[in-house]
Amino acid sequence: MAKFEYLARDKQGRGYRGVVEAEDANAASSKVRQQGFYLTNIKLQAKQRNVGRIRINEISVFTEQLSVMVGAGLPIIRCLRTIGQQSENKVLKKVLSELTKEIEGGNSFSSALLRYPKVFSNLYVSLVKAGETGGIIDKVLGKISEYLNKESKLRRDLIKAFSYPVIVAVVAAVVVTFLVVFIVPVFAKTYRTMGLTLPMPTQILIGLSILIRHYWWALLLTTVLIISGCKAAKKSDQGQLAIDKIKLKIPIFGELNQKVLVSRFVRTLGLLTASGINVVQALDVIRQASDSKIMTQSIDKINREVRKGAKIGDTLLKEELFPPMVVQMVAAGEESGQLSAMLNKTADFLERDADAMIGKLVVRLEPLLTFLLALAIGFIALAIYLPMFDLISNMVQK
């Protein structure tokens, strides 16, 4: 499958630009026309350059520096050279050098960015293209930098929320495995020598020890198969959709995942519309940038309705993914003619709500996970010493 860049117009004459995957140009053209567009130009996407990944905060700093320098009236080629010379990141330095050569060769800044999809997302490129078209590239770059800063903060908060339970779970697994593999067999051998009748908890613990020590390869193989199955499922639309649904239904974390998903959609839509991109094209960009099948399905439904003339607030109302508050805020923004501003306010509210939820999660999970770890170790200790208590009790009675 190859990627093709296309230019098209809808029935109202509005222009669109995007990327579509297909086996050849004819198949790509058919896909574009099936979306209700009139194709004006289509070509094979320029060869992409493979470079290492660059952290989002570094892209944010670069974008902010570029915004300030372009806003001061400096040519973009000079800006890229200056930032590249000062950068300590070798990958970024290389990318900026190659971008400079692309622009010197006659390509636009947005066209040059297309060759580095692992560094500059489709959202980033679309916004830069809008800035170039409207002659407000410096302002758009400033908005992109602000967006990336908020996205970086959101990622840090999510890592903070999910890292603690993962660390505790790993520690618990290591401690329990050590006790079961190395400590329990010693006591089990002693009890067999003494000919003691073992209580049920002790029998369960010894059985678990035998299972782990003698059939560890089966457990390891099962784990590998589960992980491989999940990775394979993610490659199919149905599998990815099922995984995304599970993420939204996980106790405690499901609501947080939904807020983050909706917040990103609202923030991105506000950024795109504020940069002069119409709603339909903005939805196309968000769809290509989204890694959630549930969100892309909702966007497809919303896009079809909006193209028919429906208001975006009315279309959101039909999608369960979006909370009533978001629907009301978007509808109010449309009615007042301030959709972009209302979208940004809504995203700010959702992100504050997510931050508060993350704080509550950490506070609640800490004692809960500590209790579960203590419960597991307590069960092991009880199962180990129960036979000894029975032995002592029998000796006292005699």
Image (spheres, rainbow, N blue to C red):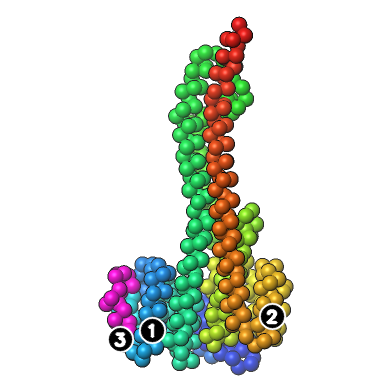
- Labels 1 and 2: the sequence-earlier one: 1
Q: Residue at x 50, y 36 (%)?
A: 176
Confirm whether the magenta stretch covers residue 234: no
Q: Residue at x 37, y 76 (%)?
A: 62
Circle 2 Cα neighbour tier, 10 Å, few/some/many (<14 / 14–19 / ≥20): many
Note whether 72 is above or below 122 in the view shown. below
Q: Secondary structure at mark 2?
A: helix
Alpha carbon of mark 1 to alpha carbon of mark 2: how far? 34 Å
Q: Which residue is mark 1?
A: 68
Note whether 81 is above or below 173 in the view shown. below
Residue 104 horizontal/vertical position (percent) = 31, 88
Q: Secondary structure at mark 3?
A: helix
What amino acid does circle 1 point to?
Answer: Val
Query: Would you say residue 56 is visible in this rendering?
Result: yes
Confirm whether the magenta stretch covers residue 84: yes
What amino acid does circle 3 point to?
Answer: Arg
Q: Are marks 1 and 2 in contact (CB under 8 Å)?
A: no
Q: Which residue is mark 3?
A: 78
- The image quadrant that residue 13 belongs to is bottom right
Q: Secondary structure at mark 1?
A: helix
Q: Which residue is mark 2?
A: 331
What amino acid does circle 2 point to?
Answer: Ala
Residue 55 horizontal/vertical position (percent) = 40, 67
Front position in the image: 214 or 99: 99
- Labels 2 and 3: the sequence-earlier one: 3
Residue 347 horizontal/vertical position (percent) = 58, 73
- The image quadrant that residue 390 belongs to is top right
Residue 379 horizontal/vertical position (percent) = 57, 31
Q: Which residues are magenta?
A: 79-94
Note whether 369 is above or below 121 in the view shown. above
Note whether 231 is above or below 105 in the view shown. above
